Amino acid sequence: MQADSPPPSSRGTPSRRGRSARMAMLAASHSTDALPSEFSNKQLNSFTSCLSIPVEGALPIKPQDDAPSSPQSRMSQQATPGSSKRAPRKSKTNALAALQSHASQLSNDEGNSQDVTDDFFNGHSPIPVSPRLDLSSVKTSGPRYLPDHTSSRPFGLPDCPAFYPTSEEFKDPMTYIRSISEKAASFGICKIVPPVGWKMPFVTSTETFRFKTRLQRLNSIEATSRAKVNFLEQLYRFHKQQGNPRVSVPTINHKSLDLWLLRKEVQSLGGYEAVTKNKKWGDLGAILGYRGIPGLSTQIKNSYTRIILPYEHFCERVRKSPALSSSPTIKTDPHLKTHTNIQSSNSRQSSLRYPSSPPSSPLTSSSSSLSEPDDGDSKERIRTRSETNSVKRSTRTAAQGQFASTVMSRDGFGRMPSAAGAAQPDEVQKLTQEQSCEICQKKNYEDQMLLCDGCDCGFHMFCLDPPLASIPRGEWFCDACLFVTGGDFGFDEGEEHSLTSFQARDLEFRRRWWATHPPTHKSPPDLNDPTVICVGNTVVTEHDIEREFWRLVQSPNETVEIEYGADVHSTTHGSAMPTLETHPLEPASRDPWNLNNMPILSESLLRYIKSDISGMTVPWTYVGMIFSTFCWHNEDHYTYSINFQHWGETKTWYGIPGADADKFEAAIKSEAPDLFEAQPDLLFQLVTLMNPKRLSEAGVRVYACNQRAGEFVITFPKAYHAGFNHGLNFNEAVNFALPDWLPYGRDCVQRYREHRKLPVFSHDELLVTITQQSQSIKTAQWLEASLQEMTERELGSRRAARAMGITERVEDEDRPEDQYQCSYCKVFCYLSQVICHCKSEVVCVEHAKHLCSHPINQHVLRLRFSDVDLQENLAKVSERAAIPAAWKAKFQRVLSDSSVPQLRSLRALLAEGERINYPLPELASLRKCVNRASEWLDASNTFIIRKQSRKRSRRSRGRPSLNESTPLSFDDRDPGDRPDRTLDDLYALLREVETLGFDTHEIGALRTLAEQAEVIKNKASALLKDDRAATDRDTFFNECERLLMEASSVNVNLEEIHEVEKIVTRESLIKELEEKVDDTTTTLEDIRNLLSRARACNLPEDNTYMKMLLARQHAGDDWEDRARHVLDQPFKTIEELDELSSTDSNIPVDVSIYDRLMSARTRAKEFEKQAKIWLLPDNQGSKPKVAEVMRFVARAEKDFSIPAVKDLGQTAEFALDLESRCEAILRNRYQHRDEVDIFEMMTKWRSYAREHLAVFSLPTFEKLDTQLTLHQKWLEDLPWYCQQHGAKHGQDILNDVVDSTRPEDDLPPNDEYFTCICSAPVRPPPPGTQSDAVQCDHCFARFHGECAANGGSCPFCDHRHWNGAINKGRNWHFCFLPQILLSAPEVTKNYCDAWKQLEIIVHRVDRLSSVIGHFLTFASQPGNQRAEYIPQVRHYMRKLYKVQFAVSPSREVSFGLDLAGLHRILAGQPAPVRVRKRRRAKFVFGQDIDKDWLDGTRCICRGRTPFLLNFPTVECEMCNRRYHTGCVFYPIDGPMGQQLHRFLCPLCCIRKNRPYEYSEVRVKHFDNSDEDTYVNTTLMLETSSKDIIYKTLPRPYTQTLIVELIRYTSYTSGSSEVVNCPPPPHSVLTPPLARPPESGPSASHRLSHTPLPLPTPPTPVYELARQPSTNGHHVPPPPPWSTQWHNITSNPTPTRRSEVPEYSLPPPPPLSLSPHSGKKRKFADESPPPEARGSRSPKQTRRLPQTPILPPASVPARAMQQTLSPSLAMIVSPVDTEPSPRPASSVPYSGPASSSQRPSNTPPVKPIKLVMPKNK
């Protein structure tokens, strides 16, 4: 890209700002129209760019003008302040076209030269791509073996070797590479194909991975092509500068003259003078391809003289000019803005001003961080430190190799001016500087000062040669800028891609390219050949692609531009191979062939580098497309490199062995000498190719290989390599180094120093680090030579520094690399640096004079190590390296000293060799010899060294040992102590040692032993033949014993000695038997030993002693069998143990078995004793706990069968069962399933425990006993408790209370005949009958005759009915009931029906009391005492009359008296005029006309969602319809979806004009299709609208229910009007039913229904089948729950106190249980409806009501008031009668419900909450 240039201004003023020479020319030649017509060319130059293919996801790279990404960009901005990025890519092509035009075309009408651009876009839309790369669309593996091809590779290049390691060889990469390096190094590169089954996973995210590319123009990369373009560009500039812009390329015989080739050939023949002198111009014509043309030599000479020769003279003059001279005599003012200062400052600014940053790019100012420096696949790197996150030095950077650094001058010492004097990027600062002339160095005559458009330096027009009279038109460049044109070649930035966008561009480019450039084949290629691919409809081989690539590289007129994603940092984008940080569980992350692990393997020297170097020790990745290339280069520091292709098309490699590196450099320099003259370090820049064929012709060995997916390519040290890609592929590469690399590394450092190129790391520091971290001999051997060279070189430098008088200083710590890098030659001088106090830069000793202007004796030589340290370090390494050689010399000396060396010498030599951690070839044979000698020595020691004799104890453990001592005999030794080697074995060892060839003292000892054994053998033979055994027996036996003692010292097995031993043993045994055979203390083991010895001595079986031993052994074995049988039984009895313990003393026994028997008997006795103590207690000690007794029984019954223990265990089981039942009772987890009352059952438990289980400590039972006592006391406190019958009689009271306190019955009936004190209307009698009704004279209320007879007066008017004057059966006050309710114990609250009845009574009466109290408070105001409230007063009085007992918050208040007084007041007023009540409008929704679904619901879903079948449901308390909880957003608070709150369905809420609690409800009319229009039911109900009112609502954003309105009926003035009424044919309107009559006081109505089936009870715990104990122990009878009571069943889920078994009121027991196991509901808050109202359906019957929740009794009184109504709180706490705030109910109080809205067959059973609503 090119930025805008400043506008032109007057050249004669300092404000004239120019641009670089390249930028100026490129701007002038930006388009063909800018060239003069004389340079037109009718030949079309094609230009094809892959950028013309638009692809989705490909983004242009934004220039980073504000924040340069590298010092290179900073340098570029300062060098060319007026320019930005590189000019358009076709500018050089245009310049070349202009110079190639000829004179015959000057008048041609075609005009200027043109380019033909192959536009691949053609106006098409961008190619769409997917976000993720499909790896199945690329090649992930290559063919292991290729078929043989008849055709050879292009240029006839041989292939490099390919290796196929086995799985075993592939385990260690360094070992394998070292094994093949001898063969492969001579080729420079090689290919390694992994074994079958090895796979490296590709872990890069193809969706998020993005990379930047570089643009490569193929015909600009080749050295010859670029040299030709640069030459013609300079030639064109020169002639244009000289005022001759109309010069053109001459033509000879209609063929353009190749000016560049002409100049090259003239120079090769010695130059212009030599060619002219030798008359070679005609020969040049033949070389240029012209033959048979008259005057050819003259035409060529004239063309050279006219066009080329002036340019050569100009170049020669510029080379010799002071501006480009490097003479040290030139002194310049560093503060002057001169050409020398600017050029040198620009070339070195990055190293001086930014010492810690990488140097600049080898490219031009257009280079970005992406384009610098290119490397293809072997990494032109910008290294990064992982430790400091700072950028490490670029390796192949050409900042020092730029044209300016090699041809521009420095000051006398080669120094750069200070940063203050350098050109600044700020334009304003430049304008303020004074301009000086580059020639005269003066600042005068500013109006005559001409500024160069390239370097911005000033020149007096009269100082120029030749001088200028006027300012030239257009751009003007100084000689230096004109001379160095073309030295700024580099790669432009491409675009930013994802893998899929890059794949799409590559595929489309290949398809279109091969469609327009199809290859030709002699015969059709084999499509099964893996090297043949089909691109679109074109068949292409790998050789076709290779030939086409080199054709495009060398084509002067066909320019192809492609992209290459090279040098993608893995530290930024992540390696494509798994690492331990990113994929710790992936096995491949530990694979040694993983490129992340390769540089740090144990044998790689790069692991000693102290920092991570991106691209060298950290892999870089490369994404290539077709024709993308990497140019000729070798690796940084000449290291090895390894490249792996993950997937994609083939990559072709070319390699040159390191031995031919010098030939290669000479060949490429001779091919393009001008390029290397301008840039001597051109090969470091990786921007130059040369045809392999030309290299082969120059004598350079070039090899090639094709790398495919899954294959490795190795490059060897110093080997040049290049290559290109056949299509999209993904590679990854990294460096490593083996020990044989060290000499190459040192040579590379020296080469970097000569070219002043930045090295990547310090070679000397690497050597020192290796010596510090590796002390192995193997390391020392390959390190010694390099370390010695380093030491000698360093000591020589120090001697030179000392000779110059430089003082020195030693430092003990390392410094950062930038603090020991020579600022002159860029080498890392790690061991010593020359410094000065005036600046921070350092130099090496060789360049000490270039540091500063101070005298050199003021400089300091800073040493990292002293001379002694260096020499000692070298000595240690040399000593370590010499260890193997010293050991070999010692080994040879030992062998030469004696033919039979001492064994200890050989052993010492072997031990020393094994301590040497280095492979020694002689060590194996020495080890074999020493091991064989050791084996012989071990065998000889079995004769020489006698084993220790192990005497066995003859003492028995259970009984006294024998008093007699046994005489010592040879037989007393352990059989293992006897010799097992014979005399023949001894002689065999002596014969063997004569062949082994070593000497040791054991040989003599063996010979002496053999002689002694022969003597003993002869003596034994003589004794065995002696006849004195019968005559002189004692003497004979004594001699035998002496011989045995003598033979015991000789460790040789002699048969003769064995015979003598038998004689002595038999005699000793007979003596011993005479003493022991009748001894009663002899154990069974002793008897067996005596028998064994007797048989060993061949004592006959009929011997007397033998018979006695056999008899005793038989008796002992019989006892042992019986004892073992008893001990092995799982349950032993005391009788059996007693029997075996009392055995005959003459029977020998096994002491260990006897001890076990007695121990078991003792334990059994102790168990029996303890069990009897617990069964028959003395009531004095502490009682045992049941768990303790059960543990005791378990221990006893584990081994024994004891009756007392069994009885104790049975009793303990009863006690344990009782404890568990009591605990279940106390924890409210007991499930009672018997018909007997639970408290009656617990009373039986108490009686049983006191009678039979008093021996145990039963803490849980004692707690329950206390609770039962409190419970009985609580029952007696109930007002309706009957002491005579012991009954509670609370059911009738509960029925009356429930009938009188229904919430929906708070309003009086609308029927005018409801005037009696009872709940039935007083209607006129049928015609012809007489009524018994009577009427009150005061209030005119009519009463049934039966009701009027009770008391004989009007209950509404007569206060005696309410003050106690008229006696009633329930003569207590309500205020005492709450106190009784709270005083109940826990067991009463959990299980007592009376408490549950009382709880219902208290809370229902409390609610009624609160309602009546609110009403009385309201009616106490005079303005509210109106006659219209008489029905309400009578309604409340009917309720109080039915419950009979006094109701009020305190005894001082009587609501009955207050109501009676109020009634008298109201009855005395005139009767009000009744106003007809307006009926509420009626809505009919879709659910109203639906039929019940399969599960009995009429839900919002309307049965249209099958998966909701059997979903949890909830029932509306008003319409009794069931809904799915999920459909109405109802929260399921309890398990199994049971309802814990009152629920009013959405439809009832709409009809009641109430908000729905759980979501928003919207009504949609079935005839209105507008999706945002809904029915406004609230306004319709409030205004009694006749029409449907609509409203517009936004789209729902919360939980919203939408119901469908079918019909709307409005009621006005007694008439109804149906609006929008298209009801279904089957729908029938049902009129409201009249309210049924209710009974008077104590009337009970029964609901007939079948109780729910109960679950089958589990099997009882105890099945008492044992007969009563006969041993006198106390065995309790079976407990009362063992046969007729069910055992406990604990509910796994704890229940709340409010959850008790469900039952129906008022039916008597048995109670109906909930089908939900373990979930006990408290009680119903109202009774079922009378039979007259109809019975429930089976589904309705299963839904039993819930009860209010009452806080536990343990809560303090004040806390209790928090949940009570005001009246109840006043009763509980009379002192503080002010009600406390209480939490609101989760379901708001819905107010009184009209009985007419509920069908008569629907019972009013609804769940309620304890907490009552606030006053309304």
Image (cartoon, rainbow, N blue to C red):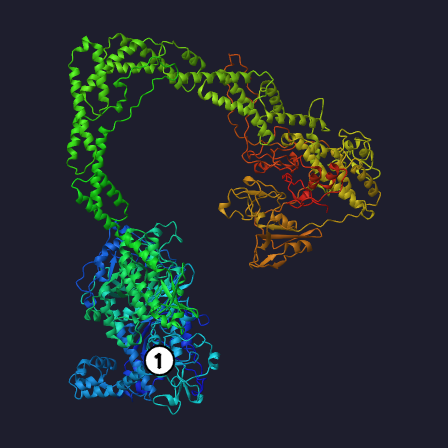
Q: Position of residue 1162 (x, y in %)?
A: 46, 16
Name the residue: 31% across, 13% down. Answer: 1087
Q: Is residue 540 among the parts visible in the rendering?
A: yes
In the figure, 351 relative to 1770: above or below? below
Q: Which residue is mark 1?
A: 329
Q: Position of residue 741 (x, y in %)?
A: 27, 59
Q: Quadrant of the N terminus?
A: bottom left
Q: Is residue 1700 left or right of residue 748?
A: right
Q: Position of residue 357 (x, y in %)?
A: 41, 67
Q: Nearer the viewer, residue 810 or 1335?
A: 810
Q: Is residue 648 left or right of residue 524?
A: right
Amino acid carrying label 1: it is Thr
Q: Helix, strand, or loop for circle 1?
A: loop
Within the image, what quadrant is residue 671 found in? bottom left
Q: Nearer the viewer, residue 582 or 1294?
A: 582
In the figure, 849 relative to 741: above or below? below
Q: Position of residue 1659 (x, y in %)?
A: 50, 25
